[in-house]
Amino acid sequence: MRGISWIFPAACILLVPLAGKDAAASMLEPSNYIGFYDDMNRNYITLDEYGPFHFFDVYTWMYAGPDGMMCAQYKATVPSNVMVLDGTSYNTGVISHTGSPFGSPGMELCFDTCREGWIFVSNTPMMTTTGTSPDDCGPLVTIAPHDETGVKKVSDCGEPSGSHELGSLDPGYINCYPMAVRYHPYIIDLDIVSHTLLDIEYHVELVYVCTFYLYKEGDTSQSIPVTRYDWQVEGSVLRVYLGSPMIDGTTYILEAFGRSLNGRGMASWKRFLFDASVATLLQSYDVYNGENGIVLTWELAEDPDNPLFTVSRREPGDNFIGLPSEEIRSDDNRYIFNDGGVEPGKEYVYKVDFISGSSSGTLFITEPIETPAVSLALENYPNPFNPSTVIEYTLPAACSAKIAVYDIDGSKVRTLLDRFQSAGRHATVWDGTDDSGHGVSSGVYLCRIVAGRQILSRKMVLIR
């Protein structure tokens, strides 16, 4: 495909790989990588502005190979005209980190659990101190071996843990000289539909010649040909058709291989165990916004013995987090789960896993679903009341909220709340007393909430 000059924004050219030995030889071996980006979407950039006192952020991401990642050791450097500022923030999954994320002697960090695929590590603010134009500078962030150990490596999730080299994504650094913006394809997750069908949550931003390979873990010669592709949800879920069935009980690696216009390639991988009993179990599923959160429903083709389901949820760029499975309700072969812990105006992806006897696996992964945005709301009950009333309010976004009660003349009677709160529904109680704890007389009072720049009031009637 050398010489291609077409540009397809937010898309890629999907190619069916050649089967056999030549295809296996062309694949990149699974490995571990680190990259530095300008935002949470893992973009390569050219700084639009470059000169003294230009501020920018560096987002560090890693990609774990098939053996997973528990710890990493490396050194990242910046040139003399870049100043690393205080205020590096880490992924909450980073349980320990020593050293400097940029500079000597380097960084050593570990995660709370075994990590697979893309992993957000940290965000570091920086500033350029000199420079005149983007044409006269080189890379702003590069990777190097740790000063004390002389290596850049990761520790995998094995028992005992093994070590692997930590490579740099191509180009893997923020730069300030003009260059083509390039993106790597990556597999977010996959759903096993049948012996010959896979639904892949897959993302690619710009021009790439995209090819998928499926092969047995540890043996690239035992590959299954991919015959064609079909978008199920535009830009989100890709259906992959296999030329021969997967073997029950076999662990496979699915590789998404991308090639940019300059001929350089990069791939992402997903490791999974094919369980035939799970792949044919799911009849249908649905996800939608209900009255009290997001609702998941699924129906099985048959009723297994003592099934155990686990539901997990993630936001874009995050890892899946388990939700309380005891809230799953069943009706014969149909199951319902209501997630009431969502926030308004946010996007979520859900995964349902299944265990029954010796069979286990992922039943399905949903496409992203966004909760409806809400406006500031305030109400109380009962109204009229004696001796107390419950004040319920909904915050459209996390903010500093203040709730106070005023009399009919506009004098403040009681401050009920004055602190930062998360978005969503909240409640407090007014017991009919003032700030000194004395009971107030019967009458009409005004409850007033100030949330950020929004203000809302409601009349309340106290009857003694």
Image (cartoon, rainbow, N blue to C red):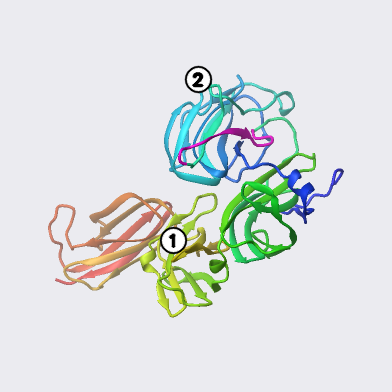
Mark 2, residues whose alpha carbon is within 10 Å: few (<14), some, or many (≥20)? few
Q: Amino acid at mark 2?
A: Glu
Residue shown at 47% from the left, 28% from the top: 86
Q: Which residues are magenta?
A: 159-173
Dominant secondary structure, magenta: loop
Q: Quadrant of residue 63?
A: top right
Q: Position of residue 190 (x, y in %)?
A: 59, 58
Instruction: State yes or no: residue 167 in magenta.
Output: yes
- Residue 463 vs residue 148, the one in the foreground: 148
Q: Position of residue 257 (x, y in %)?
A: 71, 48
Residue shown at 49% from the left, 28% from the top: 107
Q: Amino acid at mark 1?
A: Val
**Which sits earlier in the primary sequence, circle 2 or circle 1?**
2
Decide if residue 309 is on the left or right side of residue 263.
left
Q: Which mark is residue 148?
A: 2
Instruction: State yes or no: residue 328 in magenta.
Output: no
Residue shown at 54% from the left, 43% from the top: 67
Query: Mark 1 = which residue?
Result: 342
Give the SS element for disc 2. Answer: loop
Mark 1, residues whose alpha carbon is within 10 Å: few (<14), some, or many (≥20)? some
Q: Position of residue 197 (x, y in %)?
A: 66, 65
Decide if residue 18 is on the left or right side of residue 156.
right
- Between the C-alphas of marks 2 and 1, the distance is 45 Å
One can see residue 259 in this view: no
